Amino acid sequence: MLTADIFRQWVLQLPYKKELPQAIYLHKDTLEQTHKPLHKVITAISNALKIVPEQWNVVKLSKTQFQLALLDYPNFYDVPYPELKQSINIDLAKLSHRVLHYDIEQNPPILHRKELMLSPDHSRYKEYKDITIEAEQAGLYEFVNQIGFRDSWIRLIAKKGYVLVDGRLFRESTLPIEEQHKVDRYRTALMRRDLSLPFKLLEKNDFLVSEYSFFDYGCGRGDDLTELLERGLNAFGWDPNFRPDNECQTADIVNLGYVINVIEDLDERIEALLNAWQLSEKLLVVSAMLANDDFIARFKSFKDGVLTSRNTFQKYYQQAELKGFIERTLDELPVAIAPGVFIVFRDKELEQLFLSSKQRRRSAIPERIHKTDKKQQLGSLYLQHQQSFDELWLRCLDLGRLPAETEYAKLELTIQLAGSARVLQRWLSQIFDATQLELAAAQRKQDLLVYFALNLFEKRQQYRNMPVRIQNDVREFFGTFKVIEQQATTLLRSIAQPILIEQSCLHAHQQLPASQLNEAHSLVLHKNYLQQLPALLRVYVGAALQLYGDLTDIDLIKIHITSGKVSLMGYDDFSKDIPLLKERIKIKMAEQKVDFFDYLDEWKMPPLLNKEQLVAKLEATT
């Protein structure tokens, strides 16, 4: 049986390979020639997954994880820099796989240094070695961050004064070089009187606090920096036009705010993102402008964006396009926190705490927590230390369980007052209403299940060293991580079953304080009721929000029962008797696409005529 240790040993033993920091690459012919046991195992895996031999010819082997990928470069032997058509990523530890298609990409990854993936006695080895030397002499491999994708590679070749003819490099010195349109990037720097949206979102998500340091990469005129410094935060910034002499330095949180969308050169755009990522120690915030095709059509096209009337460049993204750009460039999964704004976590424990907090309900403090009249029937010891015992019980209701010592500073003292942990638990059950704790525990268990299911949907790695709080929760409510992962997997698969979605919508309509059910079609509810939905619908909506982000400007959520879609509606003022629809967002989960529909003219704003069906007891949940 192949284990992680054996796999790692085999990878290190391979004599011929293209080696990168995290993985090695080699052609399957070379693998078969140099390591038959590993080739036999990979062939067996591909057969088990029903992958025909023609679907891959290069294998990528992880040096640090028990993982591999089968890559398909159809023209490996035919062109010097072949394009990637398909990648089948296989997690040998979880026995799972994921297929990524690149043949539909307008800018696919390409392959370099092919000779390293072959043995020196291969008939094409010298030919490919000469191609590599040719590129090295042209200075093309001095820019390793700019050679991974076809368009960047072509532009880099042109910058160096070369052209590709049948895949080989030739000097372009005898040809006139077309003058490039020079844009005025500095004109994109706006003057503001409050924080920009990325920093407002950091503040909303409790990251804009003194325990973190901040660096604003491309800070413009420095309005955000001024505000951060006035708040007493440790903040610095750099900008190529307004603060070019400032030093770029590492920080806990780095902001790349609306920078990549004003850089007309894709290579520089990629470089800016990579540089900002390298400076971040805990997380990077990336934001860019979004727009639909109708809006973009108003401007003059230039490269992959447009030129504005102020002679500035803008690359308007689609939400999924921006997410894909960040993910491909950094090889990290970004987290959407708003349209056009993503967080990329370097601190993976902080990432898990952030994601789990999004699914965690805050238990309301009951008006009465005691079973009896404490003045007459409770013991003198409790009456002397009432505040300590009441604080502990409220902490129990917050967690849904008895806290660990690291989760409640006064736990040891309270145990000493009772005499032992066992006596303390007995006292708590006698003094307080245990049904309150049972309800809190049930809620916390469901919140955990939703959080794990959404991690699986995003194919986000379940990190071995989870935050202590989550480890304690899993042990208390599920026993082991294996149990919760199995239940989360079952829950996640259920969102693809319209019958179960319809049943959950019917149940939710009966249980929610207010909602509108269009049978066999949709369920509409106010966002304040989102966490009161059954777990299945919370995962269904949560999967859509992983692509969209925060619901700050949204009022109503529409769950489409059969089409795999979620619609979000934002109104001009929902407190009005008849609010007007300001924007509608349709999220298509199967296509991973977000469509935005704005109603900018007031006379075109559809009125909400059935608001009374959606606001019953709304004030009690706000």
Image (spheres, rainbow, N blue to C red):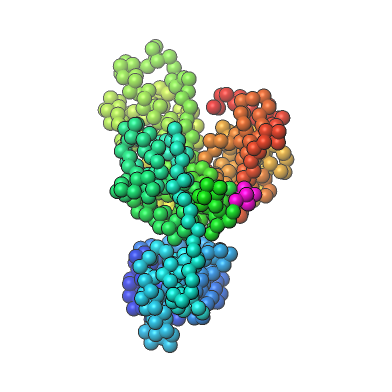
Magenta stretch, residue numbers: 293-299
Q: What is the x, y in percent for residue 348? A: 38, 49
Q: How many marks?
A: 0
Residue displayed at 52% across by 40% down: 550
Q: Quadrant of the C terminus?
A: top right
Side of 444 where 139 appears, left or right: left
Q: Position of residue 116 (x, y in %)?
A: 38, 77
Residue 109 seen in the figure: no
Res. 234 image quadrant: top left
| Residue 525 is a magenta residue | no
Vertical arrangement, residue 268 with respect to residue 226, above or below: below
Q: Position of residue 507 (x, y in %)?
A: 65, 37
Specify the farthest residue to the top.
376
**Residue 2: % across, % down:** 40, 69
Whether residue 294 can be seen here:
yes
Q: Nearer the viewer, residue 210 or 377?
A: 210
Q: Residue at x 45, y 81 (%)?
A: 29
Q: Give the quarter of the image for residue 216.
A: top left
Q: Quadrant of the N terminus?
A: bottom left
Residue drawn where x is 67% and y is 33% of the image = 602
Q: Residue at x 63, y 39 (%)?
A: 583
